[in-house]
Image: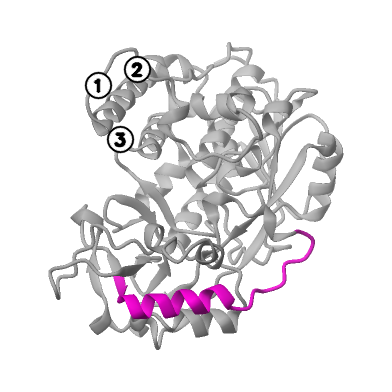
Amino acid sequence: MKNTDEKIVTVIGAGPAGSECAWQLAKRGIKVRLMEMKPEKMTPAHKSPLFGELVCSNSLRSDELANAVGLLKAEMRMMGSLFLESADANKIPAGGALAVDREGFAGYITQKLSSHPNIEIIPGEVTEIPDGEVVIASGPLSSDAIADKIAELCGSEGLHFYDAVAPIVTIDSVDMSSAFFASRYDKGTADYVNCPLDEEQYLAFVKELRSAKEAEVHGFDDGGVFEGCMPVEVMARRGIDTLRYGPLKPVGLVDPRTGADNYAVVQLRKDNAEGTLYNMVGFQTHLTWPEQKRVFSMIPALANAEFVRYGVMHRNTYLNSPQLLDRYYRLKKELRISFAGQMTGVEGYVESAASGMLVGIETARRLLGLEPADFPIETAIGALAHYISSGSVGDFQPMNINFGIITPLNYRVKGKRNKNAEISARSLKIIEEKIGEWNEDHC
């Protein structure tokens, strides 16, 4: 490996993106100053002082290669992702999805980063952008001080929207006589608690949800809610059946008590390894806490539910990345500064960690005097980088990984799942062929 001449990179933020970025840099011999404001300063959404905290869902979505996020995770595993290493070590049953125990997941990442000889942890809020090589991964919950500095750096290109967190209940308080265990289409094991509503119950629930009192959110207006994290009450106002085609869809959930589908179904997903806590799938909300208790208790199985965490709404910030960033997530006008994570316009935990991985790998290669890895658009990692830097058409919006942004096949394959599987096979072959070259800078 080439001499680093004690090159140092400052990484601001130890969420999924910052943690992954720091790990990729450190294991390639680059010294890292990892700056994190927790636990000295917390946000309303953060509950833990640990690194890599998952503040919304504990699900990392599908692990299947016919699903784009499944492909992304497979690529990241091949590239030695700390995020996926921790997820696999702290996996809890969730049907065909990869879900994790929150505390175990974050604890694993914290221990790995804290014990690495190339990483110096610097606690406290960052109020200025440091000199030298910097990766800003402060996330959608960036403090006002660093957000103001980013706004100064990027001019008027910073944009804001809201993110929402779903409530969590204790499993002991769920009325299982009004619920049943199953996974949609019987995929994997029966890990979800399904809480059905008949037509009358559903219509009454939607009526109350539409008119329930929302908590005040200061500084922004509700028009900025991102479609991918829509509060359940906003969905309810869009149409009487919107929820039945969204988080309450009954399709693929045959009730074992009746042998038939229900009119609507609320799903609960395990939130910790012990299986004592379950979150309400798709129930991001910013209703007041008393209103959440009142309205959500209309769901028969949750009539006497104990809510250990209510949903909250928080600010989410992202950049107009196609104008500001290159394919390496570097600020075009000041290449010493890179961004990583949801702030760049990648949406989701896995995507955020993937952006941190790419930034860490490419920054390390540059500092080591090596050629860029240049992940191609045929890979999920490369497709995300292309999308945020040049692949957007019209107004830029945050994006989950999907097969639509990955270079299509140059031949026809019958069936969507078969086509997606072929795309995944091609992507993983590229990674396999290039991984030796991309990892040549390891110690």
Residue type pointed to by label 1: Val
Question: Which amino acid does the dot numbered 3 rest on?
Answer: Leu
Task: Give coordinates of residue 266: x percent, y percent.
Answer: 36, 69
Instruction: Assess disc 1: are there few (<14), some (14-19) or many (≥20) residues with their C-alpha within 10 Å of its C-alpha.
Output: some
- Distance from disc 3 to disc 1, alpha carbons, whole Å, reads 16 Å
* Quadrant housing residue 33: top right
Of circles 3 and 1, the one toward us is 1
Looking at the rendered structure, the secondary structure element under dot 2 is loop
Residue at label 1?
413
* Pointer 2 local density, CA inside 10 Å: few below 14, some 14–19, many at least 20: few
Q: Amino acid at mark 2?
A: Leu
* Nearer the observer, 341 or 181: 181
Q: Which residues are magenta?
A: 194-220
Q: Which mark is residue 65?
A: 3
Q: Earlier in the sequence, mark 3 or mark 1?
A: 3
Residue 330 seen in this snapshot: no
Where, by quadrant of the figure, is residue 8 drawn?
top right
Q: Residue furthest bottom?
A: 304
Please identify the quarter of the rendering in which residue 327 is found: top right
Q: Residue at x 46, y 72 (%)?
A: 168
Q: Which residue is mark 2?
A: 409
Residue 211: x, y in percent?
Answer: 58, 77
| In contact (CB < 8 Å): disc 2 and disc 1 | yes
| Disc ID at residue 167 | none
Q: Nearer the viewer, residue 231 or 153?
A: 231
Looking at the image, residue 417 lies above or below residue 262: above
Real-space CA distance between mark 2 and mark 1, rounded to the nearest whole angstrom:
9 Å
Choose between 366 and 429: the one closer to the eye.
429
Which scheme is used to colour this image of the protein? one colour
Left or right of 382, for residue 197 = left
How far apart marks 2 and 3 lie (CA) works out to 16 Å
